[in-house]
Amino acid sequence: MAFKGSYAGVGTVSFRDMLLKEQILRAIGDAGFEHPSEVQQNAIPFAMVGQDMIVQAKSGMGKTAVFVIATLQQIEVDPDDDGVDTLILCHSREMAFQVHKEVERLGKYVTDVNSACVFGGISVTEQKAMIEKQTPHILVGTPGRVLHFIKNRVVKIDGLKRLVLDECDDMLQGSEMRRQIQDIFKEAPKEKQVMMCSATIGARAKGICRQISQNAEEIFLDDNKLTLHGLQQHYVEIEEKDKIKKLNDLLDTLDFNQVIVFVRSTERASALDKVLQKAFFPSIALHGRLSQEERLERYRKFKEYESRILVATDLCGRGVDMERVNIVINFDMPKTSDKYLHRVGRAGRFGTKGLAVTFVCGEENKTTLQEIQDRFEMKITPLPTAITASSYKN
Ligand code: ADP
Ligand code: MG
């Protein structure tokens, strides 16, 4: 059997061995999933029988499918009940959209189950009408908008069976989102399955996760196991004024399918995008200061390969799954080692090959670079003058 990359060779459980419903197995086959990843093998058997879950696993290893499959497997539709069965909360609108697509894809043969997706920045009236029409059993959304609909009784969660927090550490970190999530928990029944996941769950997040779950099955990884083995990681020491020229050189010489260039601010994202377009690079920018329609349109364009270079802020630093991305460039150094790990994980999805290049500018950046290497126990080496494309391209 051909395996797609470095996750292979661990465990021997197949999706069929998990005794999933035939409709789900068919959709898994259609999605092209041949073999469950390590985290899927370890987590699905617990999650599908209703156990609470706190799951940490590397970027790009299919954590979404863990909670989506576990949900689809368990859901029982009661035609007389118009309440939500499973609520999946995501940290960004793009992620809610993406996770909902996965629900639709893996649930396409479970035809009695409806799903819907809601998030901010889009007309409340339209979404309300959509929910009333769909009566979703699975609702995916961002906390603010979901809470709004719960408070207005557009969404009923009195009979909620499952609550999922994707990128849980991020969602529980910020005080506003944490409060919204707490409010949602207050409205939900005490007895329910809680599933949480992320590639990074630090001590503080772990504590909160434990508080909001009961006897959760916990899957944690040591920091030194988080490195993606298919991903080559290099740095370039550089002065601010030389960054654009270097980026230009890299985009000219590297063989990329798609590339994400991360910058530290919205302003820098728009500015760099303009520079690239003027130089005739097929680039678009994605950040939080665009209108919601524009944000989703650009997300879709990049996902559908209509554009090959994405200049983005940390808005896209987590969770976003663009399978053709094989190169990540940190034009600006990420602020923390967590952010670094998530950003570079946008390349090398599901064990595929990739390349990450980080611009290091000044002493502070050097310190961060060292912290990253110490924490994940790996080496980020200077970018060699020549790299063979086959080492970072499948
Ligand atoms: P994570 O949340 O762990 O970062 P995702 O759930 O976004 O990862 O999945 C990453 C990619 O891997 C997605 O494109 C998904 O469709 C794909 N994928 C998930 N499970 C499998 C599998 N068992 N076999 C092949 N591809 C998979
Ligand atoms: Mg994810």
Image (cartoon, grey):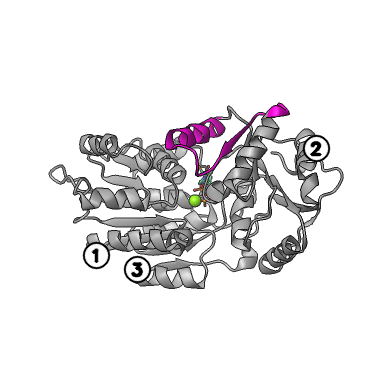
Q: How many neighbours does mark 2 have within 10 angstroms: few (below 14), some (14-19), or many (20 or more)?
A: few
| Above or below, comparing residue 192 to residue 292 in the picture | below
338 with respect to 158 (left or right): right
Q: Secondary structure at mark 2?
A: helix
| Above or below, comparing residue 371 to residue 343 in the picture | below
Residue drawn at point x = 47 percent, y = 56 percent? 167
Q: Is residue 357 magenta?
A: no
148 with respect to 68 (left or right): left
The disc labelled 2 sits on which kind of residue?
Asp
Spot occupied by residue 166 in the image (x, y as percentages of width and height): 43, 54
Residue situated furthest right in the rendering: 385
Residue under pointer 1:
191
Residue under pointer 3:
212
Please give the range of residues in magenta.
278-304
Q: Quadrant of the N terminus?
A: top right
Q: Please report whichever mark, 3 or 2, sits nearer to the chain's N-terminal start.
A: 3
Residue drawn at point x = 35 percent, y = 53 percent? 143
Q: Please report whichever mark, 3 or 1, sits nearer to the chain's N-terminal start.
A: 1
Residue under pointer 2:
249
Distance in Å between CA atoms under marks 3 and 2: 49 Å
